[in-house]
């Protein structure tokens, strides 16, 4: 009888190691929701700082300049580190090889399955947006189209005051501050949101009553 330990494909990790590997894989997944809620302050701080610095750089310089400076800074770091390690190896007469050998051996290619998955996901969202645009701009529902018109009218005033980069900077700041503030003051904020929703729904109901009967919207409960 052959020894099971010598049979290929029969060797498995101990349960503890399997659990540890599973836990590590689970912990390595850090969602956007965790970032904006500052579950890990260090990671959230790094992402917020880098994104804000990048947007501020884009506000002061052109996109080409920002990308060029970033790539130049990265090259300066890698070239300096490579020269430093080469000098250390020459002095110590060691044979460690290329300092980035482990990184160069990693597979950085994008698998076709992953690419197709993201393309399909993007296509689903694009089709959904196109359907909504068709419904709104062809006035399938008069009230919803009027809401969009009001929003677009308000955005003309926003665009007159802020440019695109400024809006992105404000959006980045709000993205990393509003969820945290809401989480800490959820009860009070929900109370005021309900009051606003009630007033908006009342105003919409009054508007619908003044519309011709054929244009009134009937929602299924």
Image (spheres, helix red, strand yellow):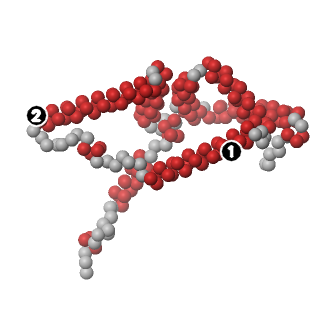
* Among the two numbered marks 2 and 1 on one chain, the one whose residue lies closer to the N terminus: 2
Left or right: 92 as drawn, with respect to 156: left
- How far across and how far down the image is residue 196, in percent? 73, 31
Left or right: 37 as drawn, with respect to 208: left
Residue at (69%, 25%) from the top-left corner?
A: 154
Q: Quadrant of residue 13?
A: bottom left
Residue 53 at least partly seen: no
Cα distance between the residues tagged 2 and 1: 67 Å
| Quadrant where the image shows the N terminus | bottom left
Kindly identify which residue carries mark 1.
131
Kindly identify which residue carries mark 2.
91
- How far across and how far down the image is residue 104, in percent? 29, 44
Instruction: Identify which residue, 72 or 93, lies in the foreground.
Output: 72
Left or right: 199 as drawn, with respect to 81: right
Residue 152 at least partly seen: yes
- The local crowd at label 2, few if under 14, some if 14 to 19, many if 20 or more residues have their Cα within 10 Å, is few
């Amino acid at each position: 009888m052959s020894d099971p330990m010598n049979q290929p494909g029969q060797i498995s990790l101990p349960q503890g190691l399997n659990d540890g590997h599973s836990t590590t894989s689970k912990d390595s997944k850090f969602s956007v929701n965790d970032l904006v809620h500052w579950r890990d302050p260090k990671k959230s701080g790094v992402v917020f700082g880098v994104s804000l610095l990048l947007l501020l750089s884009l506000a002061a310089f052109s996109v080409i300049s920002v990308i060029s400076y970033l790539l130049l800074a990265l090259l300066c770091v890698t070239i300096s580190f490579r020269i430093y390690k080469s000098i250390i190896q020459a002095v110590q007469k060691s044979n460690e090889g290329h300092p980035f050998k482990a990184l160069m051996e990693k597979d950085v290619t994008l698998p076709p399955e992953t690419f197709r998955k993201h393309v399909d996901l993007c296509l689903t969202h694009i089709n959904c947006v196109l359907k909504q645009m068709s419904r709104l701009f062809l006035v399938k529902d008069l009230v919803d189209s009027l809401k969009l018109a009001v929003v677009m009218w308000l955005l003309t005033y926003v665009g007159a005051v802020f440019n695109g980069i400024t809006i992105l900077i404000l959006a980045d700041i709000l993205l990393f501050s509003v969820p945290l503030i809401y989480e800490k003051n959820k009860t009070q904020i929900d109370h005021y949101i309900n009051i606003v929703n009630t007033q908006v729904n009342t105003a919409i109901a009054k508007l619908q009553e003044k519309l011709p009967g054929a244009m009134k919207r009937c929602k299924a409960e």
